[in-house]
Amino acid sequence: MTSKGILKIACVLGLGVMLTACRGQLSEKPPIHPNMNMDQQERKEAQEVNKFFDDNRSMRQPVPGTIARGLKKDDTAYYEGVDAQGNWIAENPVELTKSFLYRGQERYDIFCTPCHGGTGDGKGIIMTGGYGYVPAPTYHSDRLREATDGELYSAIYNGVRTMPSYATQIPVEDRWAIVAYIRALQASQNVDESEMNNYDVDLAALQQEYRDEQDRLAALAEARAKEDAPEATPELGEQLVTQNGCIACHNIDGAAGGIGPTWKDLFGFDAEVVTDSGERMTITVDEEYLRESIINPAVKKRVGYEQGVMIAYDYLADHEIDAIVAYIKSLSDN
Ligand code: HEC
Ligand code: HEC
């Protein structure tokens, strides 16, 4: 046979082998795997015992003192907003540039405006809708103007009271960009009229626009409240105090040690209070006092709770306050 003939036969045989291998049949047998290449090895499930090591763990700990590349976060000022002693740092550790500020504005508009509002006045769409959220504070108060950059950073990083942390959504650099932008917002809303005259703006028109917007929001809130004001029952009151997060600070079982005074047997109780002008007096808790404490808690503070942080719940509708008062009354045998 010629070598050409041998080649022909080899080709036909080869084709035959290939075709039989490609008939699309399922096989229970393992594939032929001539070169093992360490492809199959013993492996451990999470938490499985591994007798190879003294501590019998299959999940190995990092060698003491080692830190994975890129995970060394010893710059607490940058990552946590605090110095080595744990105090808020005063100033943004990131260099302030125009693009950084714009980045902050963009991120703020995405993550913070729904609650804190475009100007930081705490009147975001969620807050003005009457949905019963814990109100977001305005940034334009002396307290927050004087707050350090570290403290503002911490609100995003750790959350603050009922506001959750945004650390998982917002990376570190962006958090600082937002802090820088909040400072810009604060500056923009705290300008002297005389200073405004340096700018080419129609001050009277701006002021009118602002008043119109406030009126519009107030009318909106009032209309919503009237729309279908239900009866001011204790049951509604109970629902409202849950929705508004009051229970985070007040309990109803009389236990001591709450952030705010307990509501158990509060109605009719002779409470010692200190007024906003520093005068101490004893009052009997009645409906009027409860209303005042909800709408404007700073007027009379319970002795022993003066340091407490309760915001003014003046956004609640009348019937809602009535319902909460009825609920607190229902917790008392007095
Ligand atoms: C879902 C609504 C909501 C969003 C979104 C939100 N906040 Fe807040 N924020 C609140 C509420 C409510 C409080 C007040 C919490 C309290 O007093 O219990 C608050 C408080 C704060 C405070 C603290 C003020 C103080 O009194 O000390 C800062 C600062 C702040 N927010 C910044 C931000 C920033 C920055 C963002 C965006 C990254 C943001 N918040 C997003 C609702 C929100
Ligand atoms: C962040 C904590 C906190 C939250 C949330 C809170 N309070 Fe308070 N509350 C306090 C503190 C602290 C005091 C005591 C200081 C004072 O009298 O202002 C207080 C006082 C009061 C008092 C007067 C009690 C007394 O014995 O003098 C009433 C009534 C009251 N709160 C109702 C409410 C209602 C209703 C809500 C929800 C809509 C609410 N609080 C949410 C902390 C809170």
Image (spheres, grey):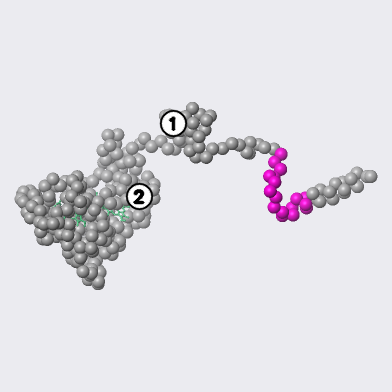
The quadrant of the rendering that contains the N terminus is top right
- Label 2, ligand 1: CB separation under 8 Å: yes
Cα distance between the residues tagged 2 and 1: 28 Å
Q: Residue at x 32, y 38 (%)?
A: 77
Q: Position of residue 198 (x, y in %)?
A: 22, 56
Q: Which residue is mark 2?
A: 166
The answer to whether mark 2 and mark 1 are in CB contact below 8 A is no
Q: Which residue of the protein is positioned furthest toward the top in this rendering?
A: 54
Task: Give me the disc on residue 205.
Answer: none
Q: Position of residue 224 (x, y in %)?
A: 25, 69
Residue 219 shows in the view = no
Q: Position of residue 101 (x, y in %)?
A: 34, 50
Q: In the rendered structure, which amino acid carries the disc numbered 1? A: Thr
Q: In the rendered structure, which amino acid carries the disc numbered 2? A: Tyr
Compared to residue 63, the image places residue 19 above or below, namely: below
The magenta segment: 18-34
Question: Does the magenta stretch mainly form a helix, a strand or a loop?
Answer: loop
Residue 71 shows in the view = yes
Q: Position of residue 192 (x, y in %)?
A: 19, 55
Q: Is residue 253 left or right of residue 172?
A: left
Decide whether residue 294 is among the magenta residues. Answer: no
Compared to residue 230, the image places residue 241 above or below, namely: above
Please name whichever residue, 232 or 218, is drawn nearer the observer in this view of the structure. Answer: 232
Compared to residue 240, the image places residue 141 above or below, namely: above
Q: Which residue is mark 1?
A: 66
Q: Which residue of the protein is positioned furthest toward the front in this rendering?
A: 333
Q: Residue at x 50, y 34 (%)?
A: 49
Between discs 2 and 1, the one toward the N terminus? 1
SS of the residue at dot 2? Answer: loop
